Amino acid sequence: MPATANAHQIVLASGSRARREMLAAAGVPFTVLPADVDEPAIRDRLFRENPSITPQHIAEVLATAKAEEVSARCPGAFVIGADQVLALGVELLSKAPNMDLARETLKRLRGRSHVLHSAVVFAENGKVTSRHVGAARLTMRNFSDPFLEDYLLRAGEKVTQSVGGYELEGQGVQLFERIDGDYFTILGLPLLEVLAELRGRGKLEA
């Protein structure tokens, strides 16, 4: 991945494979330059400052930090920053660092509904130009322990690469009984809003 981007380029400030694949499939020309931000430190600071902060705001702040950091390094480029937060009731869940914790996360989500908040922030020359936060509610079915073990075996390390331990575009869809919300928002990027913004900014043909 390049360390810099040319002026007037579209830059995705995220190393997420899902976000990268969505933009590429939509025919968007872009460069990938992951942001260098300390997400856990930002989350900790937000909770210290406001213990009742909403998941939407956390996702927006994190996406803003990514967009601004990369935009400051890429003058003239149009930068897309994104972040996703999973809320299980009032609790926020993060990516599981290993298979055992992914298993525990999926057991906690089993038979319950959770909400994914996906924020996208656009920036140019170090300053935010616009932002959007989408939300989707997902309900997992009450799957059996044998199914869970089979799913973990088949999905492998991918369960540690996404919040909640699943990829809806893959075998993770078998975990669910109901989904309410925009599909792209669930994957981590409100794509229709991104495309509308790019057209509005003259980055894509209208």
Image: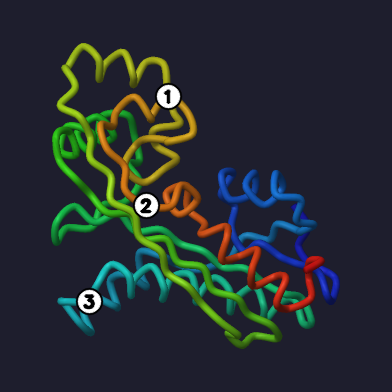
Q: How is the rendered protein coloured? A: rainbow
Q: Amino acid at mark 1?
A: Gln
Q: Depth check: 25 or 85 in front?
A: 25
Q: Amino acid at mark 3?
A: Ile
Whether residues under marks 3 and 2 lie with C-beta atoms below 8 angstroms apart, the answer is no
Separation of disc 2 and disc 1 at Cα? 19 Å
User: Vertical placement of 116 versus 72: above or below?
Assistant: above
User: Vertical placement of 31 versus 64: above or below?
Assistant: above
Q: Residue 94 appears at what percent x and percent y?
A: 31, 51
Q: Residue 47 appears at what percent x and percent y?
A: 22, 75
Residue identifier under label 3: 53
Q: Amino acid at mark 2?
A: Gly
Instruction: Name the front one of labels 2 and 1.
Output: 2
Residue 181 tag number? 2
Mark 2 residue crowding within 10 angstroms, few (<14) / some (14–19) / many (20+): some
Residue identifier under label 1: 171
Residue at 32% over, 29% down: 99
Residue at 59% over, 52% down: 15
Separation of disc 3 and disc 1 at Cα? 33 Å
Say which label, 3 or 2, has the lower sequence index: 3
Q: Residue 202 appears at what percent x and percent y?
A: 79, 76
Identify the secondary structure beneath mark 2: loop
Q: Quadrant of the C terminus?
A: bottom right
